[in-house]
Image (cartoon, rainbow, N blue to C red):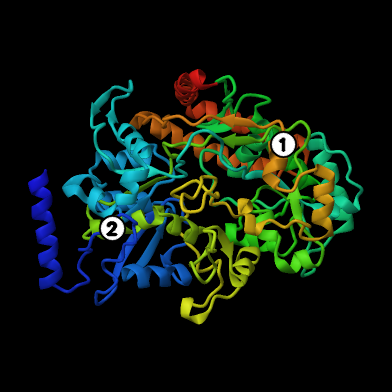
Amino acid sequence: MKMKKVISSLLVAAMAVGMLAGCGSSGNAGSNGSGGSNASSGEPITLTVFSELANYAGEMQGWFAKLMLDKFNVKINLVASADGVYETRMEDGNLGDIVVWGSDGKNYLQAVEAGLLLDWEEDGILDEYGPYIRENMSYALEKNKEVSAIKDEEGNVISGGDTIYGFGHNVASSAESHEAFFYTWDIRWDLYEQLGHPEVKNLDDMVTLFEQMKEICPTDDSGNPTYAMSLWPDWDGNYVMYVKAMATAYFGYDEMGFGHYNSTNGEWYYAMDEGSPYLQMLEFFNTLYRKGLLDPDSMTQKYDQMLEKVQNGGVFFSIFNYAGSAAYNTEEHIAENKIMRSLVPDEASPIAYGMSVYGGNRIWSIGSKTQYPELCMEIINWLCTPEGRLTTEYGPRGLCWDYDENNKTYFTDFGYTCVTDRTTMMPEEWGGATFNDGAFQINNTTWSLNDVNPETGEKYDKEFWASYQSAEGLNDADRDWREFTGCTLVEDYMEQTDYTVDIATTYAESKRSAELEVIWNQVKTCIVEYSWKAIYASTEEEFDSLVQEMRGRVRSYDPMEQCKQWCEEEAARKNSLQAPLR
């Protein structure tokens, strides 16, 4: 292997001298992961990035694209996972240069088995071009070996188990804590204050509160109707995403297959069982719809359209911080004494995910057919450095953020404007466009935002930077929230709730048989289709009828309940890993 590595390095060096400089990444990234060995080359290289998580397709534009061009002499052509895209690329035998997976389940394992992903240790590529990853993410790399093993239907390893194809998202350097909450139950606090802080024990109280908010705030900043919630179908999978997520946020049960998993005792609840967490939340959204509190565009709009409505003050509530306070709390709204802050019902038990040195299930990988494996590795390696992690989250260093004389992170004035209003226009030299339109569109993470930046001793999450804290509060409404909750930070408030922790382990979803996969897809399509129909039911009777029809159709597709059995076995396997850690 050592001789092979020497020969490979000589070949790469020879290519760099004898061919156009744009034909590969010949330099060593260095231990600090600075990368950019192709940056002095001639014509830019276009890398195709296939991401199952992306909401954008086409050549990336704006500030992140400019950074990639300056740093690596690379243009990024982003391929999103629309219907049929994965299947077509599998048939062609070429997934792309960098490949990002939404999970380490079926699609990822098929690609491994088909030989369409690069072995990161081949010719010493990881050691030479991914030194920061190799040195700091060893547990996540080892987990990937295990996840990527080819197994039979009984779970026995047939081959593999010793090859690294990538690593999962949200890696942590320590497992001593849990991730930051992102089910933060963000609500228009200025309206809640106007209403006199009514008690909110459960979902029924939430509905009543929404009705009262609608009465005092019937239109948004542009005069359009307001709604309690606005959904989007882009991320629907085994069922409607927001419905299953609402159950997770309220009961503390994580999604698993066609149901929810209770990490406190290992129980699994089938979505089609009467009274299941999923069906309870489906009824909740239908209640909102029938009361005129759910955005009627929810079933047809895109994520970006939903986000525009939040930014425009058209939505009172979101369980997600990224579709709530992060979007709404702009400088303009703050100046108008408007703000979204957390309010968790007394009976809710929001989930928090355990910090994992193994990483999550959204995998970074490289296509085996790429002509530029070293360059791909350099880019991913840079994304894993502290600078890379902060840049993908907050913009270019120097322009938006930097380290002060005490080596602590701070925002520039311009950077603060960007993070509080993502529609801020970027300078022309950074590609123009808005901060949001030019942002990192691949939509995956390397380090957990809640992990500690080794260069500063602070978390990557801006909410924990000393420079970002506001001692006096952002406005009167924010000060009212602080007085009401007794907290300064949202994270401190969430810690006071009756939350549950989904303990991190090496669990990864098993591969389903081809026969089961056919049934699975029929069930999935049925649940998503009928769930949306049920949400839009005009009466309670129509809702009940549609739910019963959905359950009947699911049984017709899966009369032996093979999907349910598979999920129960997965829950038992995950429970066996979590039980010793409880």
74 or 555: nearer the viewer:
74
Occupied quadrant, residue 417: bottom right
Vertical comparison of 575 with 519: above or below? above
Q: Residue furthest bottom?
A: 428
- Residue 400 appears in view: yes
Question: Residue at point 51% right, 19% down?
Answer: 579
60 left or right of 451 in image: left
Helix, strand or loop under label 1: helix
Q: How many marks?
A: 2
Q: Earlier in the sequence, mark 1 or mark 2?
A: 2
Q: Quadrant of the N terminus?
A: top left
Q: Quadrant of the C terminus?
A: top right
Occupied quadrant, residue 115: top left
Tag of residue 30: 2
Q: Amino acid at mark 2?
A: Gly
143 left or right of 119 in image: right
Residue 472 rendering spot, x and y as whole percentages: 78, 57
Helix, strand or loop under label 2: loop
- Report crowding for label 1: few under 14, some 14 to 19, many 20 or more residues within 10 A (C-alpha): many
Dot in front, 1 or 2? 2
Question: Residue at point 34% right, 52% down?
Answer: 99
71 or 502: nearer the viewer:
71
Q: Amino acid at mark 1?
A: Glu
Residue 102 rendering spot, x and y as whole percentages: 44, 45
- Residue 559 appears in view: no
Residue 77 rendering spot, x and y as whole percentages: 37, 65
Q: Residue furthest front?
A: 406
Could you give the CA–CA distance between mark 1 and mark 2, rounded to whole angstroms? 55 Å
Tag of residue 283: 1
